[in-house]
Amino acid sequence: MKLYISKYHKLSKKSIAEILLNFNAVGQSLFGDDKGRRNRIKVVEKDGKKFNIKSFKQPNYINRYVYVFLRKSKAERSFEFAEKLTNKDIGTPKPIAYAEETSKGALTKSFYISEHLDCDLTFRDLDLTKPGHEDILRAFTRFTYDLHQKKIEFLDHSPGNTLIQLNNGDYRFYLVDLNRMVFKSLNFTERMKNFARLTSDKEKVKIMAEEYAELLGKTENEVFNKMWFFTRSFFENRGKKRKMKLKLKKLVGIN
């Protein structure tokens, strides 16, 4: 098994190898199952510290070879992108290591290990009827603006992928699920499109547009119209795809 450990952490190669070898038997499961159909995330405690270990599901037949010969695996990208975010002073759980196992030239297993981070909320939990949540939403918008200013396009900028610590009003945001990122200057259209996956709640979009417009120096109307266009398009397309999947399942007799 190929194992790369961050030079900034002291968890030994032997300790990590033991955890990964016994992955199914150790720790507390946060997400996924042991059947290999989905990514799985577990919290494991070692030497008095907690770590998150993400076990990626096995890629499809073609990608098993692509991730060995042509492109970095999701585990390696997650690790490298976490280091880039840390260097740019963007919050993310500290990267510890990544590991890959291959057989006959194909990727069979891959893991990404980071420090465990306790949080109070995710973006999904924001509710404008609750005191303080509008302030958190505005702070989140400023955080996203900072991402864009630092030439970061987080392609999976979605409700569950930002952890929020309240920290007595000094809100802190941490990105997770990092394997899809682009590091480049973003134009206005790309910035607005980056908000599309977050929420279909028009009131939340209005607040984010208002906050972002002030930061960018554009009118609130211009920002909202563009942001809402991409948001509405994304959720409409997702709804159509779900309906199509349900129809196909009914046709083939799958419940």
Image (cartoon, grey):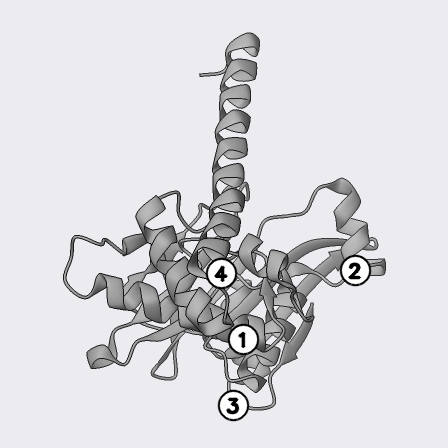
- Whichever of labels 2 and 4 marks the residue nearer the N terminus, that label is 4
Report how far apart the C-alphas of labels 2 and 3 lie in the structure. Answer: 28 Å
Q: Quadrant of the C terminus?
A: top left
Q: Is residue 25 left or right of residue 165?
A: right
Q: Is residue 57 above or below residue 234?
A: below
Report how far apart the C-alphas of labels 3 and 1 lie in the structure. Answer: 11 Å
Q: Is residue 232 above or below residue 26?
A: above
Tell which tag, 3 or 4, sits nearer the viewer.
3
Tag 4 residue? 23
Tell which tag, 2 or 3, sits nearer the viewer.
2
Tag 1 residue? 16
Tag 3 residue? 10
Report how far apart the C-alphas of labels 3 and 4 lie in the structure. Answer: 20 Å
Tell which tag, 1 or 2, sits nearer the viewer.
2
Q: Amino acid at mark 4?
A: Phe
Q: Residue 213: x and y, percent?
A: 45, 65
> As rendered, which of 248 and 194 lies closer to the eye?
194
Q: Amino acid at mark 2?
A: Arg
Q: Residue 250: x and y, percent?
A: 50, 11
Tag 2 residue? 71
Q: Quadrant of the N terminus?
A: bottom right
Q: Amino acid at mark 1?
A: Ile
Report how far apart the C-alphas of labels 2 and 4 lie in the structure. Answer: 25 Å
* Residue 192 visible in rendering: yes
